[in-house]
Image (cartoon, helix red, strand yellow):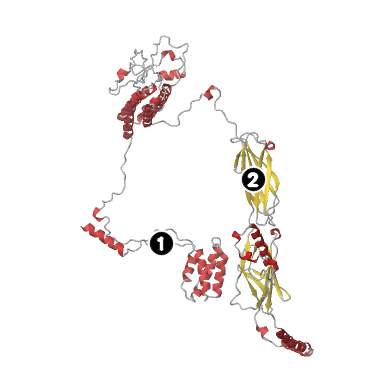
Amino acid sequence: LDARHREFEDSAGLLLADEAGLGPLQRLQQARLRRRVADAPAPDLGPPWSRRRNLLAWLLALPLAATVLLWPAGERERASAADVAAPGSAGSRSPALVAHGLRVEPPAYTGLAASELDGLEAKAPAGSRLRWTLRFAPQPEAAALVFHDGTRLPLARDGDDWHATYVLERATLYRVVAEGAPARPPPPLQRLDAIPDRAPRVRVLAPERTLTEMQPGQRSWALAFEASDDYGVAAEARLRLTLARGTGENISFDERSQVLRGRGDAGRRRFETQLALSELALAPGEDLVVQLEVRDNRAPGPQTARSPSLILRRPAEPVLDAVGLEGLARKVLPAYFRSQRQIIIDAEALIAQRPRLDEERFLARSDGIGVDQRLLRLRYGQFLGEESEGGPRPLPTADADDHASPSPGPVLPIDDRDQEPPAVADEAGHRGEVRDHGHDDEHDHDHEDHDDADAGTAHAPPAAAAPQPADPHHHDHADPEAGDLAFGRESDVLEAFGHTHDLPEAATLLDPQTRETLRGALREMWQSELHLRQGAPAEALPYAHRALELIKQVQQADRIYLARVGPELPAIDPSRRLGGKRDGIAGRALPAAAAERDDDVPARLWQALGDGAGAAGQDADLEALEAWLRGNEARLEDPLALVAAIDALRNAPDCADCRRALRALLWTALAPPPAAVPRRDAETDRERRYLDALGGEQER
């Protein structure tokens, strides 16, 4: 090749070389040679013509041409008249389609050029104009296009050709029918597929997140979108702006819009803008929602699409719950109550870490555990009717009783674990201890904060009994401090003559024995709290452990066990287990209930077409299948294929290929069977031997 053709430039070997192993210059030369080979005309590989044969052909053709030209004109006219007058075979023949052409003109907005198709089937964009040019021999009196739904489109004759025009909106089937043609078999169905115009698609390029927080000092917001469509996007798009103003129930919406012009080709355009936030005047706590709306070029009605909503939010100013020192030193309540077991674990951990902690930090942590113990004690004390501790004390006034006895100091808890509970009469004379309030339970009052570390573990001395006023309701209380009561004040009247409880109904939930156990647990918690608040967790552990044991007893006593109510089945005989014997067990398989399903018609026809007999196609109920198809087109992926298969089998009942094609399409139309429990297979010889071996072991 290099020797005979100078165009190869001594590089013909590069055409057969692997491109991966070539250098840059070699690949460039290879590409140039390939273009030259593609553009060069194909060589004539046939043998050369013989001059002798050419001369002989010319000598034979010249006499024949002269004979035709010199033939008498009258003879030719008589022969033509005889052909017209004589009833030949052409008059008895049926019209047949001898030539056809189909021109497809897509809609103008698609920008696609018109095309000429040789066949009668087409696949074109929706809205395309189809123009048929048909020729029959001999010419029929009339012709039409008959669609599968029964509509007819007449063909118009123009000389020897027949024309028809149709606008393709959706997929359909049709056949060409000429008047005078035999009815059986009819011409085959031809298919026209319409390609729908998809709606445009919008993609957000910036910002990256749907929700954007407005930064301090931000003056603009950059937005970028990309819109694409199969036939082109309109050059202009509308940007919708929605301002959400106000808070709570007083929210108002202000809608605006801007027109954006895109950049790029019609198939893929880019829309960008910079929103000036100063013009929008966003206040703290307000939102700006933007959405781009684009249109395609479809005619007569364009399709629209919207982008995801993008939100620009200006953060609201922080709201202070309190002002001044109250807000700065607000005490946060615990999110949960610690359990007694957790208090023990924390105390043991603190004891183990004591060598590594300084004295101040150790006391602070021990005091914190003591606070947790106090909260837990108050929580369990609600079941005995105890009130919350630490309530405010009334201020002294001028009308207070000047002769009241001075208030003794706070009463500290005592270690009376192994002592019997004091009698009610003995408790009446001691201030600050538990008294009988006329209820079934006793209440442990703590009018003073028990954080006093100087109290130690000493017992509080009994105070002198003050004179008690007559109480007609027998509702005795520890005397309030006379110096703190004021005449006519509502809170003092309630404190003197009434008694409020946090949970008054909680004291009646437990039986006396359980209440006494819970009271003992509270006493142990008192002692545990006392030592923890004084910085002695090792001394508090025994009391904490005893409190945990008593709490467990209360929890177990509070549980109620109910016997289950149900059928009492006989006990299973262990000798029959795993034996594999089925003596006396009869099969009780329930018959399947007949149910009408939507796919009964195609299922029956599918079974009928599976027989294989050629005549069975005539017995197939194709009319029932067509009626079922008209009501179930939406559930089928390609209903036109099923229509064409039905028509083919109806026109050729003995066609085995038509039967197989229709049966295959019917399988896709069947609904999947409902889920069911699979049946157990029959026992194999190996399984039977295994069961027999188990039976022999049972007999031994």
Residue 480, how many percent across, how many down?
A: 40, 16
Q: Would residue 583 be seen by someone viewing this image from the given angle?
A: no
Q: Nearer the viewer, residue 634 or 681?
A: 681
The quadrant of the rendering that contains the C terminus is bottom left
Residue 320, how many percent across, how many down?
A: 56, 28
> Tags 1 and 2 in contact by the CB under 8 Å rule?
no
Q: Tag 2: Cα neighbours inside 10 Å, few (<14), some, or many (≥20)?
A: some
To which quarter of the image does residue 87 belong? bottom right
Residue under the image location 28 percent in, 23 percent down: 418
Question: Mark 2 is on which residue type?
Answer: Gln
Q: Tag 1: Cα neighbours inside 10 Å, few (<14), some, or many (≥20)?
A: few
Q: In this view, does 609 lie above or below 287?
A: below
Residue that numbered label 1 is attached to: 593
Q: Which numbered mark, 1 or 2, is in the foreground of this view?
A: 2
Q: Relative to residue 380, is residue 280 drawn left or right?
A: right
Q: Is mark 2 on a helix, strand or loop?
A: strand
To which quarter of the image does residue 408 belong? top left
What distance separates the C-alpha of mark 1 from that of mark 2?
A: 56 Å
The quadrant of the rendering that contains the N terminus is bottom right
First in sequence: mark 1 or mark 2?
Answer: 2
Residue that numbered label 2 is attached to: 291
For residue 425, which numbered disc appears in the image? Answer: none
Q: What element carries label 1?
A: loop
* Residue located farthest toward the top when viewing the structure as drawn: 403
Q: Relative to residue 344, is residue 287 drawn left or right?
A: right
Q: Relative to residue 330, is residue 86 drawn left or right?
A: right
Q: In this view, does 78 lie above or below 662?
A: below
Question: Mark 1 is on which residue type?
Answer: Ala
Residue 573, how many percent across, how many down?
A: 24, 53
Q: Would residue 421 be seen by someone viewing this image from the given angle?
A: yes
